[in-house]
Amino acid sequence: MSSGTMTLLQAVNKILKAIGEPRVAATDTGGTSLAGKAEEELNDVNQEVQNRGWHAGTTDDYEMKLATQSIAASGGSGDFLYDETVTETTSGATGQFKTLGPSMLLVPLTGTFTGGETLTGAVSGATRTGAALTVLTEGKHYLNPAWVKVASSESEPLRLARRADLLYDETNQTGTFSASVLLDVTRELYFADLPYALANYVACRTAFDMQQRYERESLNSRRLQKEMDDAFAQAVVEDEDMRQSNIFDTPGARKIRGHRVYNEASHRIIS
C-alpha cells in the first residue's frame, strides 16, 4: 500500500481510462470536457464517501468553546476561515473566528478586545472594520460548514445534534449554550489531502459510476466493480491502522478499569 497521496490528475486519468478515453495532460476544472466531468463526479463521490466518517478527517474530543466576543463588523474584504486567529489592531487582542454576520463572533485567546478597530485574519488576510463590542455570557455554537459529521464526544454528558450550521442541545432542548462542549467531528478533506488508499477508493468508485453511465453492463463493468471492492477493503484497513484501535484503550474501557494499564507484551492487566 502506498503511503503517499494520489493527485487530482492521476484520479481523473484513472476515471478516463475506465471509460476507454485517453489520458489528459492537465485537469479541466469547471470545464465541459470529459476530464472536467470526471473531476466534477470525483468531487461528488469524495463528499459522499467522506460522510462515512473516516479517521483521516476526524477529530475526537474537539472542544467547542463559546464565542463570547461579539463585534459589529462592516466593510473590509476577503473571507475569514473557521477557527483562524483574528487580531484587533491597536489593542493587539486575538480571538478564534467562528462566524460573521452583522457581527463577528470570536472566542477570546489573548489580550482584551475594545471594538472600533480593524480585525484581520492571520491565515486568510481578510479584514473587517470593527464597531461596538458586546461581551456575551451565553449564545449559539456555530459549526464549521466543512464538517460533514458532528456527534457528542464520549466524554460529553450532553446529547448534541447538528441543526444546519448550529449545534443543538437535545438533552435540554435548547440551541443556547453558556459553556464549552466536546465533539467528535469529521471534516471534508480536499481530494489531494486524502491518504492514498482512501483516495484510490474514491477514484475507483467514481470510475465505476462513470463507466456505468457511459457503457453500462459489460465485462469492463465487472472488472471495475472488483477494483472498487478491493479498493474499499484497502481503505478500511488503512483507516483501522490510522485509528490504532485498541479495545483496552477506549473511553469506556478506561472508565471500567480505572487507572490500570493494559500490558500488550504480556497481555496482562497491571494494577
Image: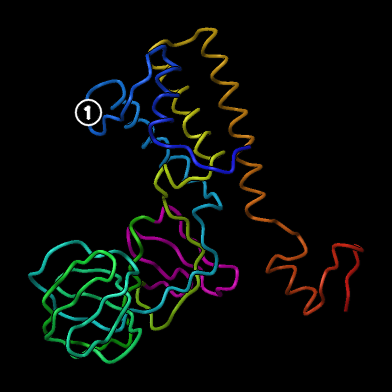
Tell me which residue sits at (14%, 72%) in the image.
128
Q: Is residue 40 above or below residue 87?
A: above
* Badge 1 density bin: few <14, some 14–19, many ≥20, Cα 10 Å: few
Nearer-the-camera pick, 125 or 114: 125
Nearer-the-camera pick, 101 or 202: 202
- Residue 260 relative to residue 134: left or right: right
Q: Is residue 150 above or below residue 172?
A: above
Instruction: Name the image quarter holding residue 133.
Output: bottom left
Give the secondary structure at mark 1. Answer: loop
Instruction: Name the image quarter holding residue 261.
Output: bottom right
Nearer-the-camera pick, 179 or 131: 131
Tell me which residue sits at (37%, 79%) in the image.
66
Disc 1 marks a residue whose amino acid type is Gly
- Residue 140 relative to residue 221: left or right: left
Tell me which residue sits at (17%, 89%) in the image.
90
Residues shaded magenta: 147-174
Residue on which disc 1 sits: 31
Q: Residue furthest top?
A: 218
Task: Return the x and y of residue 94 as percentages of the image width and height.
Answer: 29, 82
Task: Return the x and y of residue 249 as percentages of the image width and height.
Answer: 73, 66
Nearer-the-camera pick, 81 or 99: 81
Q: Residue furthest left?
A: 75
Tell me which residue sits at (54%, 43%) in the image.
4
Q: Is residue 271 above or below residue 184?
A: below
Q: Quadrant of the C terminus?
A: bottom right
- Residue 5 relative to residue 210: left or right: right
